[in-house]
Amino acid sequence: MTLSAPAFELKLAETEAERRAAQRLRYDVFIVELGGAGSLVDHDARLERDAFDPHFDHLLLFDRGRKLGDQVVGVYRLLRGERAEALGRFYSEDEYDLTALRSGRRNLLELGRSCVHRDYRGGTAMYELWNGLARYVADHGIEVLFGVASFHGTDIKALAPPLSLLHHRHLAPPDLRVRARAEHFQPMDLMLEDQIDRRGAMVATPALIKAYLRLGGFVGEGAYIDHAFNTTDVCLVMDTARMNAAQAKLYTRERVR
């Protein structure tokens, strides 16, 4: 646990060593904490990686007060639309049909592998990452952000209340409504809206998903059960043009010093 104020620095990864530091934090969070797996996970080196890593920008949050080799405490993985076109696909297209977004011909950014070191959760680390993300969005003229976010576990019965609440209250409008692919489509409208304990459902919803909803985000239709990562995924979509002024301030505000 940190005992002093973090000495944060935010930057895009520029070297292979910095990318490996991001993969090391991802290993600690997604593999050790959440029990995930993957074909390119390197358990000996403690790296969570995949074939898409070379094509993404990696936004890194450092705490320069930590020992060398252990300074990366937050990560975001970012794939711009033009890079996805050159690559031939977005990462999340294995899970979701992105036709609604692609057909809109708007400037897209896919977000993924977002995680924060356990010692920094509940503090300002996530806002630091969001400030960096906001600058990236502005620099590249991004219009729509999207990416999968996860509930821990694959017990759909246990997740029925929060999934149903997301479907009834936060389903994306048609022009943004991505849809889980038919071959693994998991319905989210598992309960009638008036049957949901809304407070309990929100408590069961991960903090990152709730934060995106506060920013004006939506969810796509249907969930994806990821047995390899021991998660149930939903696709979040945020249209920067639809953010209201209060939400925009939250998204771009600087950390209180």
Image (cartoon, rainbow, N blue to C red):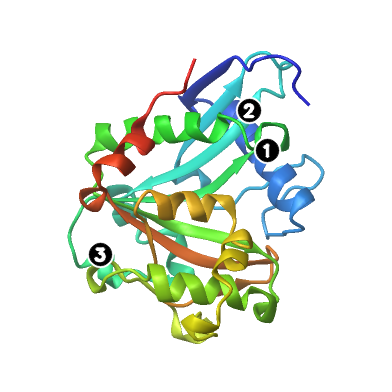
Which of marks 3 and 1 precedes in the sequence? 1
25 vs 201, left or right, is right
Crowd tier of the residue under label 1, counting other residues whose Cα lies within 10 Å: few below 14, some 14–19, many 20 or above: many
List x then y, in percent, for residue 7.
60, 14
Quadrant housing the N terminus: top right
Q: Secondary structure at mark 2?
A: strand
Per the image, the residue denoted by label 1 is: 25
Q: Give residue 102's mark.
A: 3
Per the image, the residue denoted by label 2 is: 72
Which of marks 1 and 2 precedes in the sequence? 1
Q: 171 or 236: which is nearer to us?
A: 171
List x then y, in percent, for residue 15.
53, 26
Q: Secondary structure at mark 1?
A: helix
List x then y, in percent, for residue 131.
41, 30
What's the residue type where badge 3 is placed?
Arg
Residue 178 appears in the rendering: yes
165 vs 79, left or right, is right
Q: Residue at x 66, y 43 (%)?
A: 26
What's the residue type where badge 1 is placed?
Leu
Q: Residue at x 39, y 67 (%)?
A: 170
Q: Secondary structure at mark 3?
A: helix
Please, is residue 19 above or below residue 237 in the view? above
- Asked if the residue under mark 1 is in contact with the one under mark 2, i.e. CB atoms within 8 Å, the reply is yes
Q: 40 or 71: which is nearer to us?
A: 71
Crowd tier of the residue under label 3, counting other residues whose Cα lies within 10 Å: few below 14, some 14–19, many 20 or above: some
Q: Residue at x 50, y 54 (%)?
A: 210
What's the residue type where badge 2 is placed?
Val
